Image: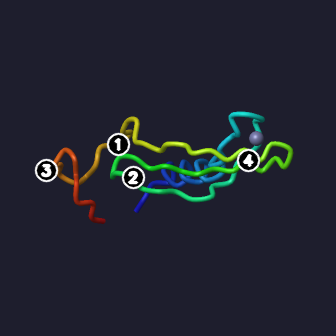
Amino acid sequence: MSSPVTQARRRNLNRANRTICPVCGGTCSTVKTDQITPQYREATLACENVECAAVFVASITPVRFLQPSRKAQTDETNSSPQA
Ligand SMILES: [Zn+2]
C-alpha cells in the first residue's frame, strides 16, 4: 500500500546503497551488520578495491524521521522491539 513516490524512493535507495571507502573512494561491500540497540546498528564494510582492501565498521542510526511512526509511542526507549 505504498505510493508510487515511495516505491521510486525505495528503488533509488537500493541503487545508491553502496558505501564509499573513506580511504580510496572505491565501493564497499557489507560483510556483516550487528544490531547493538534498537536505535543503533553497526555494519562491517570491506573495500572492493583490491589495492586498498580496507575493512571498517560504520554506524547506522536514525537521524531524523521523514514520516512519524503510525504506532503510538508508549516507551521512549522502546526496549522490547517487536515487529
Ligand atoms: Zn578503499
Mark on residue 67? 1
Q: Compute the Cα span from label 2 to label 1.
A: 24 Å
Type of residue at label 1? Answer: Gln
11 vs 25: above or below: below
- Mark 4 sits near ligand 1, with its Cβ under 8 Å away: yes
- Residue 75 is left or right of residue 26, and the answer is left
Q: Nearer the viewer, residue 7 or 23?
A: 23
Which numbered disc covers residue 74?
Answer: 3
Residue, x 86% and y 44% (percent of image)?
51
Amino acid beneath label 3: Thr
Tell which quarter ligand 1 is in: top right
Q: CA distance from mark 1 to mark 4?
A: 33 Å
Residue 37 drawn at (x, y percent): 34, 51
Q: Secondary structure at mark 4?
A: strand
> Quadrant location of the C terminus?
bottom left
Q: Is label 1 in a helix, a strand or a loop?
A: loop
Q: Mark 2, mark 1: which one is toward the viewer?
A: 2
Residue indicated by mark 4: 47
Q: Residue at x 70, y 39 (%)?
A: 21
Please name the amino acid that badge 2 sits on.
Ile
Count of marks, rendered view: 4
What separation in Å lies between label 3 and label 2 (alpha carbons)? 21 Å
